[in-house]
Image (cartoon, rainbow, N blue to C red):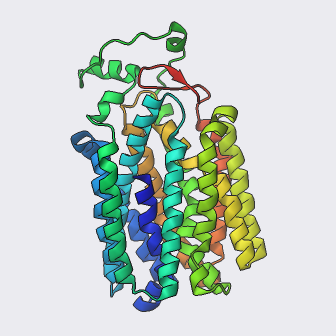
Amino acid sequence: MFLANGLGFSNLVPRYPEILEHLGITKAAFGQAVMFNSIGALVAGLAASWLITRFTSARVASIGMMVLGLGLLGAGRADSWIVFALCMAWVGGSDAIVDVAQNAHGLRVERRWGGSIITSFHAAWSLGAVLGATMGQAMAGAGVPVETHMAGVLVLLTVVSGAALPGTIKGPDADDRSLADAAEDAAAGVGTVAAPVDIDPGAAATSPIVPSRAITALLVVVLGLMCAAAMFPEDVTGNWSSLLLTEQGAAPGMVGMGLVSLQVTMIVGRLLGDAVIDRLGARKVIAGGGVLVAVGMGTALLAGSVPGTLVGMVVSGAGCAVAVPVAYAAADDIPGLRPGMGLTVVSWLARVIMLVSPPIVGWFADAHGTWVALVYGLIGGIILMLSWPALRRGPRSNAAGQAVAA
């Protein structure tokens, strides 16, 4: 499921220069059209928890990718700015729901696994993004029409997502709530409680104290900001690197390498991320990651060349590799919130922040050059460096309410 999500949208990125030329629009207008991706996510994102409760996270994630593929096909066939913008809204709305659903299911697996594993699932997303971008630039280099390319992507997403569904965890997502959350629901008269589970008294003593509403709200906001900041480098490569590399003289078959460079590093970082988080703790990983993002984007900014940009993307990818899954896991563990609510709201807030970014970058790019997108990525690194105190020091809990590595 994570692979399919990464695979879909990244196929479209290398075709952006062709779409921009075909539509005959300015970079500012292009940025405004891309902004509709966030508008769609903002409108549809809060429906994720309701859909998951009604249909389960596995079904929402799988079927949602097929729906997203239809939006990609529409974007590839668009003949006007408004059609392209509406299709981007469709893609953004579908992706927001799929994003929450696949992470909810991934965290469900993690609780049964009994240790950190969520960053490995995000590594599969990054692998899909690299494969998609590679496919996209190969199709662009071969001169395959964008609409034909996107039709093939729709078929591919349908096959991959459909094949993944039978292997998912069956039953309602509430079955994998922690014992503490189940007890809280029982006290509130919601849902059912599983059979009692024997818990080590020492583990029970580490249960988090439920903070005040003000502290809970502050945690949600900071985690939403952290999550959005972690997406800034990905947004730079997803929406602007192909245009920047084109301006720097990259060949048509190479304009997708900005995305590939960042995502390849993210794959490695996410495959190693679970062990690194267990060893160093989430706080140090996020703070250090922010430094790497700032250094990477600064390197690309100062170099102003294709090699410099690609090196900067590699370093930045190492910095932001595990930031999103760490923020999602922390959101899903905020005390005092029902299961899935923290994840849904933090994801939604991150989408709100991402809503205003593309048009602002587009306006500055028209006025000063596409290089300003790198400043945007640099700001993301600074935010990560400052937001680490929002993460808990203590361990997470598995489905049995037992402490697992943080």
Q: Which quadrant of the figure has residue 374?
A: bottom right
In this view, the residue in front, 371 or 245, is 245
In this view, the residue in front, 18 or 84, is 18
State which quarter of the image contains the C terminus. top right
Residue at x-position 64% and y-position 41%: 388
Q: Residue 293: x percent and y percent?
A: 68, 57
Residue at x-position 35% and y-position 82%: 148
Q: Which quadrant of the figure has residue 368?
A: bottom right
Q: Residue 261: x percent and y percent?
A: 64, 66
Q: Is residue 153 above or below residue 200?
A: below
Q: Relative to 231, is 44 on the left or the right?
A: left
Residue at x-position 45% and y-position 45%: 346
Question: Can residue 44 be seen from the camera position used here?
Answer: no
Residue at x-position 54% and y-position 65%: 130
Count of numbered circles on the image: 0
Question: Can residue 2 be seen from the camera position used here?
Answer: yes
Q: Relative to 177, is 350 on the left or the right?
A: right
Q: Is residue 396 above or below residue 144?
A: above
Q: Residue 150: x percent and y percent?
A: 36, 76
Q: Residue 248: x percent and y percent?
A: 68, 84
Q: Is residue 249 above or below residue 130?
A: below
